[in-house]
Image: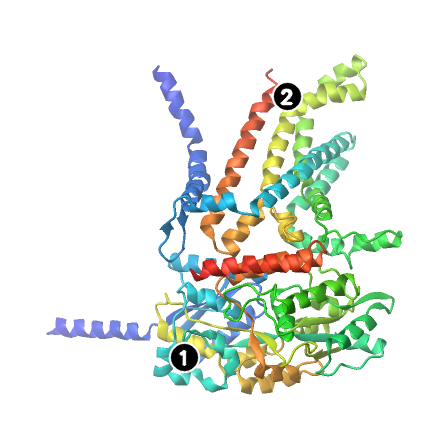
């Protein structure tokens, strides 16, 4: 009994630093956000409690439906793209025999993740420009019509998808590569001896053993896509109109450009609840398809 | 007795130290403004003139480089004030002063102007029309430093290639269209557009004023983009892109100045700020002209900036002296050589002739007919509404009457909530 108690104390001592960081950097701001949602907050002047007024505004906000719809579109487009392309790149690199080449491609694919989004976005803006852009220049040379990359409500998603894939696919690629490298080579050797084809090996060994990584990557991608900010902020400015404005950009504009911190907090709270529900559903559903080593 | 003398001497010494200890002021300056480095030099001169008894720290407040960035600038200033690190003097443009005063952040300076008028050099030298936006409710909140208007910049190399003279000041909309059409095509193997539509609030308001309209009603309490004259201007911009095909589709965050000096566009609407880009690129092939005359009398939009004193300052007198010095001749001559127009009439006359562009005189002439850009409290949100709906129009995703009606209604709603 005494020993179990001592072990429990030790366990709590180990998680204490992480718990303190969590309390100060995540839990406290979250509580602050919830509190601000019930107030008309002013940094200098006296703030007022307004009860549920911000929530009533949230329900009646005519732009919110469009903005959450846009967010959903970003999730529907970007998550499968990053999931599939990240895996294809990782499989391609893993199949290389030369370790130097693996190292080279790993650096090459992950490099854009390191680069500041603001700086590369400028170059991409130039490439996407309808009248002066590089893409349309080549399309015209081929005798094709110029594409309004940033001026059409549908093409703007294609532009963001291209930029996002170039900039961030390195993230899912690197996780997949680590996941692939952790699969014991002996399993493949045994499968080869049994005459299993490459396709069979992929579906019977690689994919099942990679499911924890797929689950991790997918969870991160979904959360990241729901919170998407950099791409629309730098590339489309949320336009044309509200066509590519996601909830992250709307929260930023409301809170920090129009200095309505309280309504911004209410919006952030709604986003938090949505992410919480989506993540809980994912964790619940993963029991059906994720294969862990100990099973 | 000896002890008394020693105490007295120590007290005097401490008092002496207290008198001699310099006051340190903080000047808040938004990032993204090209004059941050020059400002550091200007405050050195201020310190010198005060025998280093007033020190000034220039603090750069990081903001996004957008029209609606004043909101984030104020939030950061308020955070600094709430955190006990309030700047004493801050750089604020016309778009922000109403919000700054409405939030009770600015100190009225009239009392200090009466007790220390010499700090202002010659107050009457500040062009009265330009100073007016910083006098709110009969109280003075700052002394204007720089200003800008919106005129047409024309690439004269392209003008020559199209065999066209520099247009006269009374050119009409028909003349403008003829120029835009003639300047659209392939010049020296490069696709050129006649005119870049000004898809930003200040530039559009210049055109709206030229047509006797405005973004907002005269009392700035409701949106006025659904006024037929305002819609006429937005429809014109739409038609320049899609009907006449003389303007490129505006890209988000596009830089028209770059398009003009690189010869991709022949005409743009801007103030004096492009000269800050022209100069380092040795671009001098530019002529200036008023926006085509669409309604009489001619009106030219202007925006200006000053250095108001923050109400929370612990050193109001010294902060007033700094605010006044920053609008003085030395500061204007040093800081506004190329890319803005000085607000002092005397300095304007000295600085403007160095402008490397034909018809530079219209910058000075327009000071007398200039009308302040409409910038009510809540300006960032109003500008955001403008950006949102015009971007949909210029992308050909919304018709002008529907978009402008919706924009006006939203602006009215925002202005109503600000006035409550």
Image mark for residue B50: 1
Kindly report which numbered mark, 2 or 1, lies closer to the viewer in this rendering: 2
Front-lying residue, A74 or B351: A74
Badge 1 density bin: few <14, some 14–19, many ≥20, Cα 10 Å:
some
Q: Residue at x 34, y 68 (%)?
A: B314
| Residue B99, position as x, y percentages in the image | 46, 64
Q: Does residue A221 appear left or right of residue B162 in this picture?
A: left
Chain identity of mark 1: B
Q: Which quadrant is the N terminus of chain A positioned in? A: top left
Q: Residue at x 74, y 51 (%)?
A: A149
Q: Residue at x 39, y 45 (%)?
A: A51
Q: Which quadrant is the C terminus of chain A positioned in? A: top right
Front-lying residue, A66 or B82: A66
Residue of label 2: A289
Chain identity of mark 2: A
Vertical comparison of A10 with B237: above or below: above
Vertical comparison of A55 with B301: above or below: above
Dividing the picture into quadrants, the one containing residue A25 is top left
* Residue B178 visible in the snapshot: yes
Label 1, secondary structure: give it. Answer: loop
Badge 2 density bin: few <14, some 14–19, many ≥20, Cα 10 Å:
few
Dividing the picture into quadrants, the one containing residue A171 is top right
Give the total of numbered labels. Answer: 2
Residue projecting furthest to the front: B228
* Residue B272 visible in the snapshot: no
| Residue B240, position as x, y percentages in the image | 75, 65
């Amino acid at each position: 009994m005494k020993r179990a108690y001592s072990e429990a104390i030790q366990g709590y001592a180990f998680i204490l630093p992480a718990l303190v960081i969590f309390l100060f950097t995540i839990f406290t701001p979250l509580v602050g956000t919830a509190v601000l949602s019930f107030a008309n907050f002013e940094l200098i002047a006296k703030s007022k409690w307004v009860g549920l007024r911000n929530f009533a505004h949230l329900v009646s906000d005519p732009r919110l439906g469009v903005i959450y719809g846009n967010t959903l579109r970003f999730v529907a487009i970007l998550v499968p793209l990053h999931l599939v392309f990240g895996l294809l790149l990782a499989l391609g690199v893993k199949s290389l025999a030369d370790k130097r080449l693996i190292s080279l491609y790993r650096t090459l694919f992950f490099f854009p993740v390191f680069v500041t989004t603001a700086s590369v976005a400028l170059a991409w803006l130039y490439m996407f420009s309808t009248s002066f852009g590089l893409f349309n220049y080549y399309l015209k040379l081929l005798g094709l019509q110029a594409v309004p990359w940033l001026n059409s409500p549908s093409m703007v998603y294609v532009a963001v998808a291209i930029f996002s894939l170039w900039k961030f696919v390195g993230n899912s690629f690197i996780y997949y590569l680590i996941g692939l490298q952790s699969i014991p080579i002996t399993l493949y050797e045994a499968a080869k001896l049994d005459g299993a084809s490459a396709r069979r090996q992929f579906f019977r060994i690689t994919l099942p053993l990679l499911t924890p990584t797929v689950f991790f990557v997918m969870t991160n991608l979904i959360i990241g896509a729901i919170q998407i900010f950099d791409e629309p902020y730098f590339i489309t400015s949320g336009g044309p109109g509200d066509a590519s404005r996601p909830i992250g950009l709307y929260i930023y504009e409301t809170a920090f450009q129009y200095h309505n911190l309280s309504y911004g907090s209410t919006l952030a709270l709604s986003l938090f609840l949505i992410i919480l529900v989506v993540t809980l559903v994912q964790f619940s559903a993963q029991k059906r398809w994720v294969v862990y080593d100990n099973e | 007795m000896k002890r008394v003398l020693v105490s007295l001497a120590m007290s005097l010494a401490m008092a002496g130290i207290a008198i001699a200890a310099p006051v340190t002021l903080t000047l808040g300056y938004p990032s993204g403004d090209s004059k941050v480095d020059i400002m550091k030099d200007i405050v050195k001169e201020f310190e010198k003139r005060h025998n280093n008894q007033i020190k000034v720290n220039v603090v750069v407040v990081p903001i996004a480089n957008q029209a609606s960035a004043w909101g984030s600038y104020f939030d950061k200033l308020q955070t600094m004030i709430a955190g006990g690190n309030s700047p004493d003097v801050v750089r604020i443009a016309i778009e922000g002063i109403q919000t700054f005063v409405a939030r009770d952040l600015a100190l009225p300076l009239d009392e200090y102007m009466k007790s220390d008028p010499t700090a202002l050099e010659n107050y009457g030298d500040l062009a009265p029309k330009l100073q007016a936006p910083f006098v709110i409710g009969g109280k003075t909140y700052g002394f204007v430093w720089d200003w800008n208007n919106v005129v047409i910049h024309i690439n004269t190399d392209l003008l020559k290639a199209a065999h066209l003279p520099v247009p006269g000041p009374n050119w009409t909309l028909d003349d403008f269209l003829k120029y835009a059409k003639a300047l659209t095509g392939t010049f020296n193997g490069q696709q050129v557009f006649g005119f870049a539509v000004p898809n930003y609030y200040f530039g559009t308001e210049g055109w709206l004023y030229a047509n006797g309209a405005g973004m907002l009603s005269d009392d700035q309490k409701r949106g006025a983009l659904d006024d037929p004259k305002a819609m006429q201007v937005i429809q014109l911009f739409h038609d320049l892109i899609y009907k006449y095909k003389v303007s490129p589709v505006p890209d988000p965050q596009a830089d028209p100045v770059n398009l003009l000096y690189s010869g991709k566009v022949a005409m743009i609407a801007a103030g004096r700020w492009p000269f800050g880009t022209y100069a380092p690129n040795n671009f001098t092939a530019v002529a200036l002209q008023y926006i085509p005359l669409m309604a009489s009398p001619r009106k030219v939009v202007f925006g200006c900036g000053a250095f108001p004193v923050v109400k929370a300052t612990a050193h109001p007198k010294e902060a007033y002296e700094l605010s006044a010095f920053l609008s003085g001749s030395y500061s204007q001559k040093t800081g506004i050589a190329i890319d803005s127009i000085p607000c002092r009439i005397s300095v304007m006359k000295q600085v403007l002739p160095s402008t490397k562009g034909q018809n530079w005189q219209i910058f000075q002439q327009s000071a007398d007919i200039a009308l302040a850009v409409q910038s009510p409290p809540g300006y960032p949100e109003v500008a955001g509404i403008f950006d949102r709906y015009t971007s949909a129009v210029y992308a050909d995703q919304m018709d002008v009457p529907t978009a402008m009606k919706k924009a006006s209604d939203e602006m009215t709603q925002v202005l109503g909530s600000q006035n409550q």
